[in-house]
Image (spheres, rainbow, N blue to C red):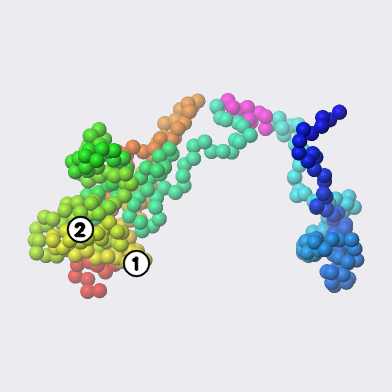
Amino acid sequence: MARNSLGGPGRLQNKNARTAFTARHKLAVVASFKELGDISAVIRELYPNLACSTFESRRKLIYQWIRDREALERVCASPVQAEKKKARSLGVATILSADDERVIVIWVNELRGFVMPITTTMPVFENYIPTRTLTKKGEKTVWVRCSGKEKNRVTVMLLADSDGVKYPPKLVYKAAPSQIPLVAEENRVQRNGFGVRLWKRMQKIQERTKMHVYGNNTAWWNSNLQLKFLETYFNSHPDMSVPILLLLDDFSGHWTQPVRDYATAINVIMLKVPPAYTSVCQPADASWMKPFKDQIHAQWIDNLREQIGEWRFREPFKMKAPERENVADWIRTAWDHISIKTISGGYRTTHTAVGDEN
């Protein structure tokens, strides 16, 4: 005997809100509509007790049957199928033979022998490798994304002149600033934004790759780095009386007032490229960035292949994110692979080469 409910309204009564119809009935309604030609007349004749509130839904349902007339005729060709209220696709609820089930059991046991997890959620990927490894075409930031360190990134600032001369890139890594203001300022001035311990490691990268390495909490370019950029490359050129044209995008850090004043003081004319025209007006976007990013992407793929190749049978596999040293080496190698022809070709494509009358 069932126990009584301790509270609440008890078992809800079945309202029969939805009604199912056989395929034979649906086809008869379609034939009636073809004869009468009026959907309202069909409903009044076949459903005289239909509530007004459900008239619209029944009208839409009949129109759906009319659209499916050919399918209903195929189903009703079989007397057995005609009395069914729902037709399932071929193969649904098919029962496998004992031999087929035995093959599946053997296959699953073999996978378990390889220490593979066989569960009800087997298709879930335990080590997901993102398909998006780099930024969109034309952007200046290369995003290296690997398993476990998706939020780590590095910003790269590239510089080359119209003669094809390439200058060492500047890298900005993510580094948490000190909570003590005095120490944070000391790190920024003396250690390029890194702490004492991390700076020892980053200094070795800087010395080995000949690239300037900086750190901040966003790994993003800013006006302070732009000032250092101008000071490094333009503060001591041979003839300070000859102005230098520097093409930059509209990033706000390039155009703060201290940056403008310093550029004027060292005779550098900064020209802003409109946001929608960098692909046709800026040499980097026109010809450098695509091969540069392709080189980094290729090295990233090689790194993944090496990790997979080093995996040993019956050992757990964990994808390792690249170290700061790896990323710096990839960037240095990719920049070295860009030829003088590619660099100068970017200036010719955008008609910004020295002596170009256009």
Q: CA distance from mark 2 to mark 1?
A: 26 Å
- The residue located at (84%, 72%) in the rendering is 38
Element at label 1:
helix
Residues rendered magenta in the picture: 104-113
Measured as percent of width and height from the top left, residue 344 is found at 24, 61
Measured as percent of width and height from the top left, residue 54 is found at 80, 60
200 or 83, which is in the foreground?
Answer: 200
163 or 48, which is in the foreground?
Answer: 48
* Extreme residue in the front direction: 7
- The residue located at (32%, 44%) in the rendering is 217
Quarter residue 343 falls in: bottom left
Measured as percent of width and height from the top left, residue 39 is found at 83, 69
Q: Which secondary structure type mostly characterizes the magenta part of the structure?
A: helix
* Extreme residue in the bottom direction: 357
Disc 1 marks which residue?
Answer: 277
Image quadrant where one finds the C terminus: bottom left
32 or 179, which is in the foreground?
Answer: 179
Q: Residues within 10 Å of mark 2 (few under 14, many from 20)?
A: some
Measured as percent of width and height from the top left, residue 97 is found at 76, 34
Q: Amino acid under label 2? A: Pro
Residue 339 image label: none
The answer to whether 6 appears left or right of 143 in the picture is: right
- The residue located at (25%, 63%) in the rendering is 247
Residue 258 image label: 2
Q: Is residue 133 visible?
A: yes
Of the residues tagged 2 and 1, which is closer to the observer? 2
Image quadrant where one finds the N terminus: top right
Is residue 131 shown above or below 312?
A: below
Is residue 257 shown above or below 294?
A: below
The answer to whether 118 appears left or right of 335 in the picture is: right
Q: Residues within 10 Å of mark 1 (few under 14, many from 20)?
A: few
Which circle's residue, 2 or 1, is located before the other in the chain? 2
